[in-house]
Amino acid sequence: MDALKNADHLYEVERRVRHAERPNFRISELQISSSQAVPWHCHTRVTDTFYVIEGRIKLLLRDPDEEVFLNPGETYAVRQRRPHRVENAGAASANFLVLQGIGEYDYIPLKL
């Protein structure tokens, strides 16, 4: 599938806020319920850095396969081209920041 410049329409979240968007860098805040997830995807030009504000998230990663659990105050960076998925790992909503850059944003949906 082709790279997308905006993937907001591909998955539902409880809340989505864009705090900053500049050429080659952006900061988004997402809140997902216990049943929501950001589906498998990758980016060819940007690194995703996750920072948990509230709740707990699970990052599922490929190349190599890995599961990472993040609690409030914890961060994890997913390098360019690494397939990943974000799930809520708790019973309550999870709220987290995604810092994306440095580079032009793209979103490539994957079927894994």
Image: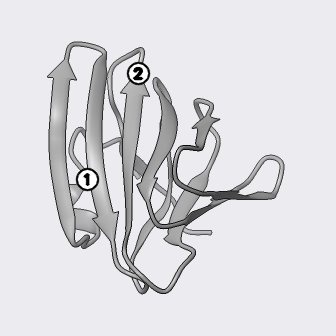
Residue 31 horizontal side relative to residue 45, left or right:
left
Q: Separation of disc 1 and disc 2 at Cα?
A: 16 Å
Circle 2: residue type: Gly
Residue 98 horizontal side relative to residue 28, left or right:
right
Does residue 8 lie above or below 98 as drawn? below
SS state under label 1: loop
Q: Position of residue 106 (x, y in %)?
A: 35, 35
Q: Position of residue 76 (x, y in %)?
A: 62, 39
Looking at the image, which residue is at 52% across and 53% down?
Answer: 72
Does residue 21 lie above or below 13 as drawn? above
Q: Which mark is residue 7?
A: 1
Circle 1: residue type: Ala
Q: Position of residue 84 (x, y in %)?
A: 59, 54
First in sequence: mark 1 vs mark 2:
1
As rendered, which of 85 and 99 lies closer to the eye? 99
Q: Which mark is residue 101?
A: 2
Residue most extreme to the right: 64
Colour logic: one colour
Q: How many marks?
A: 2
Query: Does the CB distance between marks 1 and 2 fall below 8 Å?
Result: no
